[in-house]
Image (tube, rainbow, N blue to C red):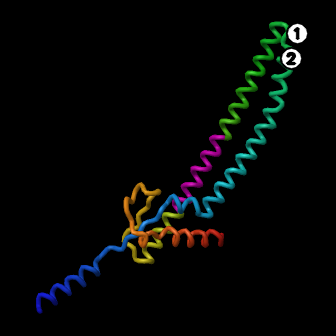
């Protein structure tokens, strides 16, 4: 009888010290997070605006190129060389503007993605402390967590709270 009582107490004590663990599917979280959707929409709008600006610069250039090809046979060799040099410089300028626009969008995407990631990380850390979790794992699809009981998957709960918090801003 004493042995049975000792075993029961040992089981109770060991169950009190168990770690509380959960996991989040980061792929689902970031795809369905309203802040991520807003970031993607903002970047798309900026990309379209930049594309229109580049098109407005490119259209006159294309016209100049067409005029050059139409009139090149009537030009002297020196005049052709001057026009080709001018067109080449203008093309380099346009390519530079396009490259700058692309780089600007990439930098902004990276900066805003880092802000979102920090916001989610901070939220999850506070959530874990509030709910008494010792560890919350992040997974992308099935890559990091090879198996996780669905009862441990708190993705939808975190996503719901994050989206509610985002909608207040």
| Residue at the top extreme of this rendering | 77
Which residue occupies 70% across, 46% down?
47
Looking at the rendering, which quadrant does residue 84 occupy? Answer: top right
Mark drawn on residue 45: none
> Could you tell me residue 142's position as x and y percent?
43, 57
Task: Give the left or right position of residue 163, taking residue 83 as reference.
Answer: left
Task: Find disc 2 in the rendering and name its residue.
Answer: 70
Residue at 69% of width from left, 54% of height from top? 42
**Residue 8, picture quadrant:** bottom left
Q: Residue furthest left?
A: 2
62 w.r.t. 117: above or below: above
Quarter holding the N terminus? bottom left
* Disc 2 crowd, CA 10 A, few/some/many (<14, 14-19, 20+): few
Relative horizontal placement of residue 25, taking residue 134 as reference (left or right) = right
Q: Are marks 2 and 1 in contact (CB under 8 Å)?
A: no
Q: Considering depth in this image, is 152 or 78 the residue closer to the camera?
A: 152
Q: Main secondary structure of the magenta part?
A: helix
Numbered disc 2: secondary structure: helix
Q: Reply yes or no: does residue 28 show up in magenta.
A: no
Give, as a single range, the part of the protein colored magenta: 102-118
Residue 138 shown left or right of residue 62 in the figure: left
**Could you tell me which secondary element the residue under label 1 belongs to?**
helix
Q: Label 1: which residue?
A: 74
Query: Dot 1, crowdedness within 10 Å: few (<14), some or many (≥20)?
Result: few
Task: Indicate the quadrant where residue 33 lies.
Answer: bottom right
């Amino acid at each position: 009888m004493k042995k049975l009582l000792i075993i029961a107490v040992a089981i109770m004590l060991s169950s009190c010290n168990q770690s509380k663990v959960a996991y989040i599917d980061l792929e689902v979280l970031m795809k369905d997070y309203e802040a991520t959707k807003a970031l993607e929409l903002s970047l798309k709008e900026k990309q379209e605006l930049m594309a229109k600006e580049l098109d407005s610069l490119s259209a006159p250039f294309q016209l100049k190129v067409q005029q050059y090809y139409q009139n090149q046979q009537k030009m002297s060799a020196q005049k052709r060389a001057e026009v080709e040099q001018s067109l080449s410089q203008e093309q380099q300028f346009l390519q530079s503007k396009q490259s700058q626009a692309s780089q600007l969008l990439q930098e902004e995407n990276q900066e805003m993605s880092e802000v979102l990631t920090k916001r989610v990380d901070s939220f999850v850390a506070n959530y874990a402390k509030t709910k008494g979790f010792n560890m919350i794992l992040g997974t992308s699809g099935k890559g990091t967590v090879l198996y996780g009981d669905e009862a441990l998957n708190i993705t939808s709960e975190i996503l719901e709270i994050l989206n509610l918090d985002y909608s207040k801003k």
